[in-house]
Image (cartoon, rainbow, N blue to C red):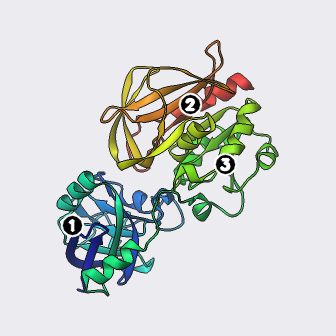
């Protein structure tokens, strides 16, 4: 097995073994705390240009199947694990994770102390990193790491979005039509809407308001996605136009950040982000606490305890993370308190992750029912 090298931009170096493809890769080093769901993580477009460190020590034991991928390919820039499984054991498994990474050209590293690496990222923050199984000189690799692109200021939604629109038909009787802007959408998201009688028109990230309105939607949806929300302007203008026409809106993850910017709030980069399937969030509208699936490195800067007047209605923070009080959801209401639009900073489609937040799709249906 080939030796491999991992070098962070601050010079911290780890030596291990090649995992997946042999080669060299660069990206932003982030860690994921999920104990399960590595296949969904790998195929989540929100991880574009990120090197994912798995905190769970044993990865790959259930192999890779043909049903659980959340897009057509693996998106992570690199993969870091401590102990890769030597065998795969699952009735749906079709191939090993190592083979899948190799087949898709994803460079990884194994056999390193991922606990030490995670603690370093928690203390110093997410940063650029390089993994190489062809370079043996840490100093030479560090030079290339420092010349790699930063995540801040980078617009990436256009790199992961569909190039052509497509339709996910409603299951059973069609009740509503939704225009879903693909900023890095996961396969399960339109499926969850289709289960509720929604015909979902998935549109490219470059779509205009006119193209959105052309499908005669009952509601507008913005998906998850990668990149810095402050560098994403066209979609914010589209959303502002839709809000001005009182089109019901539901956004998740990146869609929450863009909703915040459309309402006039700022966004900022978190020190090391939230990534995993075990994040506690309180829905302040119900008082219930949900265990939720996260993947975000940016957050909305909005006041937690005061409503904000916007050109489109009254905005409030509806959800908050109980670990660090980061804004996890927004609501837009009329002056008399009627809900117009909402968003959350996590994944309610439960791929991978808990099902606590599935009610949000029902809330979207109720919102469109009022408008029908």
Mark 1 or mark 2: which is in front? 1
Badges 3 and 2: C-beta atoms under 8 Å apart? no
As drawn, the label of residue 235 is 3
17, above or below 66, in the image = below
Please tell me which of labels 3 and 2 falls first in the chain.
Answer: 3
Structural distance between the alpha carbons of marks 1 and 2: 40 Å
Q: Quadrant of the N terminus?
A: bottom left
Query: Dot 2 lies on which element?
Result: helix
Instruction: Mark 2: give few (<14), some (14-19) or many (20+) Cα within 10 Å.
Output: some
246, above or below 230, in the image = above
Q: How many marks?
A: 3
| Residue drawn at (34%, 73%) of the image | 130
Name the image quarter holding residue 38.
bottom left
Badges 1 and 3: C-beta atoms under 8 Å apart? no
In the rendering, at what x and y percent does residue 93 appear? 36, 67
Q: Quadrant of the C terminus?
A: top right
Viewer-proximal residue among 37 and 122: 122
> From this viewpoint, is residue 334 visible?
yes
In the rendering, at what x and y percent does residue 254 appear? 53, 47
> Horizontally, is 347 left or right of 64 in the view?
right
Structural distance between the alpha carbons of marks 3 and 2: 25 Å
Please tell me which of labels 1 and 2 falls first in the chain.
Answer: 1
As drawn, the label of residue 82 is 1
In the rendering, at what x and y percent does residue 272 appear? 34, 51
Mark 1 or mark 3: which is in front? 3
> From this viewpoint, is residue 175 visible?
no
Which residue lies under the disc numbered 2? Answer: 362
> Horizontally, is 346 left or right of 130 in the view?
right
Query: Dot 1 lies on which element?
Result: loop
> Horizontally, is 154 left or right of 111 in the view?
right
């Amino acid at each position: 097995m080939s030796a491999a090298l991992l070098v962070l931009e601050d010079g911290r170096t780890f030596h291990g073994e090649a995992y997946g493809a042999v080669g060299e890769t660069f990206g932003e080093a982030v860690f994921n705390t999920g104990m399960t769901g590595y296949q969904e993580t790998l195929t989540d477009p929100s991880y574009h240009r990120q090197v994912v460190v798995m905190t769970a020590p044993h990865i790959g034991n259930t192999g890779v199947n043909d049903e659980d991928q959340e897009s057509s390919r693996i998106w992570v820039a690199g993969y870091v694990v401590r102990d890769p499984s030597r065998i795969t054991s699952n009735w749906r498994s079709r191939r090993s994770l190592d083979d899948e990474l190799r087949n898709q050209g994803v460079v990884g590293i194994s056999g390193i102390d991922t606990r030490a690496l995670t603690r370093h990222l928690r203390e110093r923050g997410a940063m650029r990193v390089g993994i190489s199984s062809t370079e043996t000189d840490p100093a030479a690799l560090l030079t290339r790491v420092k010349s790699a692109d930063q995540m801040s200021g980078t617009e990436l939604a256009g790199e992961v979005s569909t190039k052509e629109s497509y339709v996910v038909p409603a299951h059973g009787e069609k009740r509503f039509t939704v225009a879903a802007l693909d900023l890095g959408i996961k396969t399960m998201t339109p499926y969850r809407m289709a289960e509720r009688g929604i015909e979902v028109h998935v549109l490219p990230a470059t779509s205009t308001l006119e193209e959105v309105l052309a499908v005669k939607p009952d509601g507008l949806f913005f998906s998850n996605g990668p990149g810095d929300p402050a560098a994403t302007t066209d979609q914010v203008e589209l959303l502002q136009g839709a809000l001005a026409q009182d089109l019901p809106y539901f956004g998740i993850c990146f869609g929450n950040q863009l909703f915040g910017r459309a309402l006039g709030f700022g966004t900022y980069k978190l020190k090391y982000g939230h990534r995993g399937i075990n994040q506690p969030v309180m829905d302040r509208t119900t008082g219930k606490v949900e265990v939720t699936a996260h993947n975000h490195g940016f957050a909305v800067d909005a006041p937690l305890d005061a409503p904000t007047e916007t050109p489109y209605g009254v905005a409030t923070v509806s959800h908050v993370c109980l670990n660090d009080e980061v804004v996890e959801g927004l609501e837009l209401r009329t002056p008399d308190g009627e809900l117009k639009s909402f968003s959350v900073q996590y994944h309610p489609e439960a791929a991978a992750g808990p099902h606590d937040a599935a009610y949000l799709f029902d809330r979207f249906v109720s919102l469109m029912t009022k408008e029908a």
